[in-house]
Image (cartoon, coloured by chain):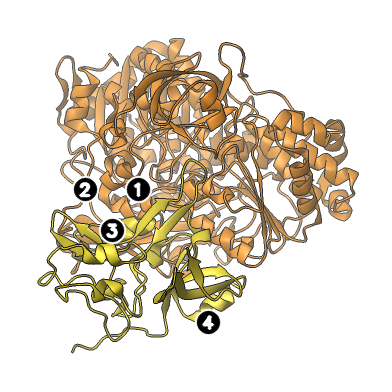
Chain colours: A orange, B yellow
């Protein structure tokens, strides 16, 4: 039943995406708002402070929040325009049900709930509990992430719950747990300020975390050397002291060679290595053959540049290493992360002022959302669902028998594969648009079509929701109280500015009613988001991500609290590891041996060009929100194929000409943008768009064996110019491509 | 004349090196109702085929504003704080003299309104003691609004310059461009 009920064009006409613009006169009431609400941007992991202007239960504008310490009023274009998601013509205002040949028609809440619950019960009875799965997302607050985790285990009683953080930073999380026993950036971004060397590995900071750029530029004002590793000259790389244009899929070779160089030239912190780490000898032995010449051959970076990077890193007194999806979205994402961590540990520059390391978490609550239990292998407090002690503690907090706690489930992409195999028959999704964000999305679409029942909770009809049987209108970021944890590990307050419009309900209310109707209501008695947070505090107590000492009041008073914060009188922990006692079982930081291996798909005669994917500054993730905000759409209206002039010449491709891009998984056409700011052997597509404009029809479903992150960042493609000039971008309507 | 809280010690500084082309300034500027949701600041690629570099152009608020000098309708005025205001809508005849005369290419004619429109340094905000919106939101502080002393402390490797030489034409401005330390003027051939 999960085929589209009518054509996608018809659904787009009714439910969007449509572009929302302010009128030329602006919104009435901005001069005299009913309320000015201090909250945070709904988009990336920076979670910039912002004030929303509210008039008559509508968000009518924004004002910079100058006092919030991380961004001090600074915002990116997405932040400036984020208010335009409110009061949007596409907003879902009633529950909808699929009607074959008609589309989606309104249905009363009671009927929508009843249908959902009866299908859950039927599928579970017929195929077993784990045949009903749930997919969640980390734009949700900590409270909702926790609630979803508990709901899936206690009310749905399924093991198969996972989340879109699986496409985000799980490689970093897994690497950090291996090395440090804990998954959080080690320092606040203020520690960038006096770092002598900043190494940014696979992080398009200026487009994906624009407000973080300020802290990097500040460091450079004080003389920091900036090293950027990226196949493209991203805006951050333009003025970098050293740009290492790496061949996609070869990152661990670079970091391995740098480690060997540090050792060969004795640029090591022996005291730190000897006393506070383990595994150094094995890590070094693994890279003993990784010479600069070898690394040049593998990575495509001139050996002199690799040497210079290693020298700068080796000689620095202070440093900060940041990475993001560029090294994590690989079938060896964890290896890449560990390769970076090895460089940090070898030089002992962690746990000190201006000596930092960390992943730059991508999603709004990418940090908190990956700690409190809506991951398939995790319980709150970043506990392990397979650990008997952890299961026992959380079972007690939840008031269930430990035997009834499901075990480890499948990860997000494995769930899609399980749907294909017929093992998973039913699905609830919230805050996840896999049809745009998962790789090989033609395969994902086929999976959706095999579902017997699919219910989606969202505020807009995202592309995946079109395959649903029931769509429940949930809440926007500004419609519920809660907390999120920023990329710095700072727990901050999200404030409700308006209530859900029409018949839309808060996500929390929807989940609580489902729990009630599934017979688990007694385990879900909360009167407020703060009630949920207070239970989360207890559930996280004693875990590595310990929030017990954090209260709503404390967050308000301190403008955020950094976890771990184990007791009420604890001030929080902005900088980790100052005592050099790591959270691993032996208390030491662990080097890990990283042997280089090739990416899951390499170029060949049929598919001779490397394709990599990424983002643009004006769009966020799968675009459910940002492809509906007119001015953001207009900045970058359609995905263009970035290609180097030499490669373009080789294939006789001209500027703005349509090029057919093909991989083993899909074929479609994109306008060429011929630029010298990319490697000669690599083309780039940004991924925020759906349908025929989707980059993820090309990407492979190859997963990292540990983190299960898909390999978005490298695959093999072929290019064929069509001899036709592309229509003007503004006419492409890519934002609503079918 | 109504009282203002204009902070005369605060100045506008533009540092192209820091610009990442994100267009937060354009988005924020366009939020102003008095602009009819049009941006008065403009971000452009220098030459996208060869570089990712962008420039950001805000009104430089010239000491001797050519736009005002060439205006046949006397629609453009400079106030006591040195802010060169956008065309007075009652006076502007949409002739585009200012558009052609400005050495920085700042004024734009809005064909729909048949009016010239340009930056007035967020007079509604600056006259109330606030910073212009573009400089407030700029995530990299390529646009900064504050005192010279703050700038000297924060950016020890750069010098603000507000003298420009276009051929033989000297132009001095209220807005500063950040240049390599020790620079005194920007020569535009």
Q: x%, y% of residue A270?
A: 88, 52
- Name which quarter of the figure residue B103 lies in: bottom left
Q: Do residues under tags 4 and 2 come within 8 Å of each other at their CB atoms? A: no
Where is mark 3, residue-wise? B39
Where is mark 1, residue-wise? A526
Distance between the alpha carbons at the discs numbered 4 and 2: 40 Å
Pick the front one: A706 or A538: A706
Q: Is residue A178 visible?
A: no
In percent of the image, x 31 and y 28: which residue is there? A463
Q: Is residue A239 visible?
A: yes
Pick the front one: A461 or B45: B45
Which element type, helix, strand or loop, lies under badge 1? Answer: loop
Q: x%, y% of residue A419?
A: 43, 15
Q: Is residue A708 left or right of residue A267?
A: left
Which callout, 1 or 2, points to the residue nearer the camera?
Answer: 2
Distance between the alpha carbons at the discs numbered 3 and 2: 14 Å
Q: Is residue A269 left or right of residue A475?
A: right
Where is mark 4, residue-wise? B149
Quadrant where the N terminus of chain B sits is bottom left
Q: x%, y% of residue A61?
A: 25, 59
Which callout, 4 or 1, points to the residue nearer the camera?
Answer: 4
Q: Chain of mark 1?
A: A
In percent of the image, x 21 and y 44: which residue is there? A88
Where is mark 2, residue-wise? A21
Q: How many marks?
A: 4
Placement of A549 over or under A706, stated as above or below:
below
Q: Is residue A113 left or right of residue A583?
A: left
Which callout, 3 or 1, points to the residue nearer the camera?
Answer: 3
Q: Chain of mark 3?
A: B
């Amino acid at each position: 039943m999960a085929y589209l009920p009518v054509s996608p064009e018809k659904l787009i006409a009714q439910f969007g995406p449509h572009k929302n613009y302010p009128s030329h006169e602006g919104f009435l009431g901005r001069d005299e708002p009913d309320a000015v609400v201090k909250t945070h941007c709904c988009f990336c992991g920076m979670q910039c402070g912002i004030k929303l202007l509210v008039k008559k239960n509508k968000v009518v504008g924004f004002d910079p929040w100058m006092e919030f310490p991380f961004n001090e009023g600074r915002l990116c274009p997405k932040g400036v325009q984020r208010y335009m998601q409110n009061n949007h013509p596409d907003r879902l205002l009633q529950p909808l049900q699929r009607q074959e040949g008609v589309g989606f028609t309104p249905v009363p809440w009671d009927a929508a709930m009843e249908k959902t619950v009866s299908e859950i019960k039927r599928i579970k009875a017929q195929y077993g509990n784990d045949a009903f799965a749930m997919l969640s997302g980390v734009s949700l607050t900590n409270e909702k992430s926790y609630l979803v985790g508990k709901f899936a285990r206690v009310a749905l009683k399924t093991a198969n719950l996972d989340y879109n953080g699986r496409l985000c930073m799980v490689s970093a999380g897994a690497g950090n747990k291996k090395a440090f026993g804990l998954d959080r950036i080690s320092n606040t971004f203020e520690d960038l300020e006096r770092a002598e060397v900043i190494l940014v590995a696979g992080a398009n900071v200026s487009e994906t975390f624009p407000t973080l750029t300020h802290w990097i530029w500040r460091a450079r004002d004080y003389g920091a050397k900036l090293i950027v590793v990226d196949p493209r000259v991203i805006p951050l790389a333009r003025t970098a002291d050293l740009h290492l244009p790496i061949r996609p899929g070869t990152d661990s070779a670079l970091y391995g060679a740098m480690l060997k160089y540090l050792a060969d030239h004795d640029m090591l912190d022996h005291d730190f290595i000897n006393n506070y780490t383990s595994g150094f000898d094995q890590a070094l032995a693994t890279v003993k053959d990784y010479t600069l010449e070898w690394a040049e051959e593998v990575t495509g970076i001139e050996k002199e540049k690799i040497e210079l990077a290693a020298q700068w890193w080796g000689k620095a007194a202070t440093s900060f290493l940041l990475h993001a999806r560029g090294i994590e979205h690989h079938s060896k994402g964890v290896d890449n992360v560990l390769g970076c961590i090895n460089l940090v540990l070898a030089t002992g520059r962690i746990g000190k002022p201006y000596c930092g390391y960390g992943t730059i978490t991508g999603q709004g609550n990418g940090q908190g959302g990956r700690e409190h239990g809506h991951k398939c292998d995790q319980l709150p407090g970043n506990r392990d669902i397979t650990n008997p002690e952890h299961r026992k503690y959380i079972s007690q907090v939840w008031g269930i028998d430990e035997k009834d706690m499901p075990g480890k489930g499948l990860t997000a992409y494995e769930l899609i594969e399980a749907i294909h195999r017929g093992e998973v028959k039913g699905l609830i999704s919230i805050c996840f648009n896999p049809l745009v964000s998962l790789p090989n999305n033609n395969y994902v679409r086929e999976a959706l079509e095999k579902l017997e029942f699919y219910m989606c909770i969202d505020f807009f009809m995202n592309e995946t929701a079109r395959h649903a049987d029931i769509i429940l209108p949930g809440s926007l970021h500004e419609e519920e109280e809660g907390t999120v944890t920023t990329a710095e590990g700072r727990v901050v307050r999200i404030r409700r500015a308006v209530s859900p419009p029409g018949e839309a309900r808060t996500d929390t209310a929807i989940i609580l009613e489902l729990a009630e109707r599934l017979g688990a209501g007694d385990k879900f008695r909360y009167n407020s988001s703060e009630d949920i947070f207070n239970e989360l505090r207890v559930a996280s107590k004693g875990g590595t991500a310990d929030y017990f000492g954090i209260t709503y009041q404390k967050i308000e008073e301190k403008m955020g609290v950094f976890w771990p914060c184990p007791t009420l009188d604890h001030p929080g922990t902005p900088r980790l590891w100052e005592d050099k006692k790591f959270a691993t079982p032996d208390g030491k930081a662990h080097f890990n041996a990283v042997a280089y291996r090739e990416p899951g798909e390499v170029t060949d005669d049929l598919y001779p060009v490397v394709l990599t994917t990424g983002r643009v500054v004006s769009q966020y993730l799968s675009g459910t929100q940002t492809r509906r905000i007119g001015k953001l759409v207009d900045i970058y209206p359609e995905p263009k194929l970035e290609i180097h002039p030499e490669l373009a010449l080789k294939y006789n491709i001209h500027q703005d000409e349509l090029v057919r891009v093909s991989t083993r998984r899909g074929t479609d056409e994109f306008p060429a943008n011929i630029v010298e700011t990319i490697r000669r052997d690599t083309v780039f597509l940004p991924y925020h768009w759906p349908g025929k404009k989707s980059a993820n029809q090309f990407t492979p479903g190859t997963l990292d064996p540990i983190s299960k992150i898909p390999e978005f960042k490298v695959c093999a493609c072929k290019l064929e110019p069509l001899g036709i000039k592309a229509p003007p971008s503004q006419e492409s309507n890519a934002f609503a491509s079918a | 004349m109504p009282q203002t809280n204009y902070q005369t010690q605060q100045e506008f500084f533009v540092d192209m090196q820091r610009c990442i082309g994100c267009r937060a300034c354009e988005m924020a500027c366009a939020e102003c109702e008095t602009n009819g949701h049009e941006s008065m600041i403009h971000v452009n690629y220098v030459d996208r085929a060869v570089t990712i570099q962008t420039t950001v152009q805000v009104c430089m608020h010239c000491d001797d504003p050519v736009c005002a000098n060439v205006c046949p309708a006397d629609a453009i005025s400079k106030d006591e704080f040195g802010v060169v205001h956008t065309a007075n809508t009652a006076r502007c005849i949409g002739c585009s003299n200012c558009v052609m005369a400005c050495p920085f290419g700042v004024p734009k004619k809005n064909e729909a309104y048949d009016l010239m429109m340009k930056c007035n340094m967020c007079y509604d905000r600056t006259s109330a003691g606030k910073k212009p919106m573009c400089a407030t939101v700029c995530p990299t502080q390529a646009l900064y609004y504050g005192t010279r002393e703050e700038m000297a402390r924060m950016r020890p490797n750069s010098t603000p310059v507000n003298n420009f030489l276009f051929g033989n034409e000297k132009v001095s401005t209220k807005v500063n461009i950040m240049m390599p330390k020790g620079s005194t003027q920007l020569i535009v051939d």
